[in-house]
Image (spheres, rainbow, N blue to C red):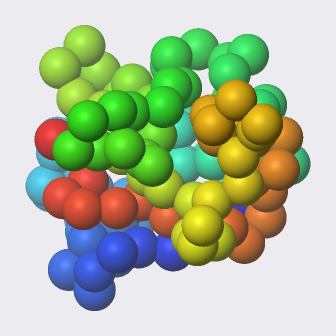
C-alpha cells in the first residue's frame, strides 16, 4: 500500500532510517521499519490482521483510525485516506477494500 503522512514534520521523521533512529532509538526504529514495510507490502489492510503486531481499529475520539503495535508501549496510528473509508454493512471498516493508495499514518505518529 502507498504510505503518505498527515504532516510534513511527521514525514521528515519517517523519511530515513537515520531520522527514525534519532527520534525513537535503534530498537524502536528497527521495529518501525518492519511495520512500515508490512504496510507498504500489504495488498490490503486485511493482510495485516494475520501478521504479528495486532493491527486493529480504534474507537472513540480515534474512530476511523487503525493502529498496529510497534513496541509494548507504542503503536503506529493510521487511517484510510478515502473519505469516507470503505465500510461493511455492519458499519465496521472493510479491511479488504482498504488497499494501495488509500491510507496514511495520521496525527502524531506514535501515541
Pick out the residue farthest to the bottom.
Answer: 8
In the image shown, does 17 or 78 lie closer to the viewer? Answer: 78
Is residue 36 left or right of 89 when viewed as pictured? left
In the image shown, does 69 or 34 lie closer to the viewer? Answer: 69
Q: Position of residue 26 (x, y in %)?
A: 24, 38
Residue displayed at 59% across by 14% down: 52
Q: Position of residue 104 (x, y in %)?
A: 50, 64
Residue displayed at 29% across by 21% down: 71
Q: Is residue 87 above or below residue 7?
A: above
Residue displayed at 54% across by 37% down: 34
Q: Position of residue 7 (x, y in %)?
A: 28, 80
Residue displayed at 50% across by 19% down: 53
Q: Is residue 108 above or below residue 77?
A: below
Is residue 31 left or right of 99 when viewed as pictured? left
User: What is the quadrant of the N terminus in the image?
Assistant: bottom right
Is residue 42 left or right of 10 when viewed as pictured? right
User: What is the quadrant of the C terminus in the image?
Assistant: top left
- Res. 68 in view: yes
Is residue 65 left or right of 101 when viewed as pictured? left
Q: Is residue 14 above or below residue 63?
A: below
Q: Position of residue 101 (x, y in %)?
A: 72, 72
How many circles with numbers are drawn on the protein? 0
In the image shown, does 49 or 34 lie closer to the viewer? Answer: 49
Q: Quadrant of residue 25?
A: top left
Q: Quadrant of residue 32?
A: top left
Amino acid at each position: 500500500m502507498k504510505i503518505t503522512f498527515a504532516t510534513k514534520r511527521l514525514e521528515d521523521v519517517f523519511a530515513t532510517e537515520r531520522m527514525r533512529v534519532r527520534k525513537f532509538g535503534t530498537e524502536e526504529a528497527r521495529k518501525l521499519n518492519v511495520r512500515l514495510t508490512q504496510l507498504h507490502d500489504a495488498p490490503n489492510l486485511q493482510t495485516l490482521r494475520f501478521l504479528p503486531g495486532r493491527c486493529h481499529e480504534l474507537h472513540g475520539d480515534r474512530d476511523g483510525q487503525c493502529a498496529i503495535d510497534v513496541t509494548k508501549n507504542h503503536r503506529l496510528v493510521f487511517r484510510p485516506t478515502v473519505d469516507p473509508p470503505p465500510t461493511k454493512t455492519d458499519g465496521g471498516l472493510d479491511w479488504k477494500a482498504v488497499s494501495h493508495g488509500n491510507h496514511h499514518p495520521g496525527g502524531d505518529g506514535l501515541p
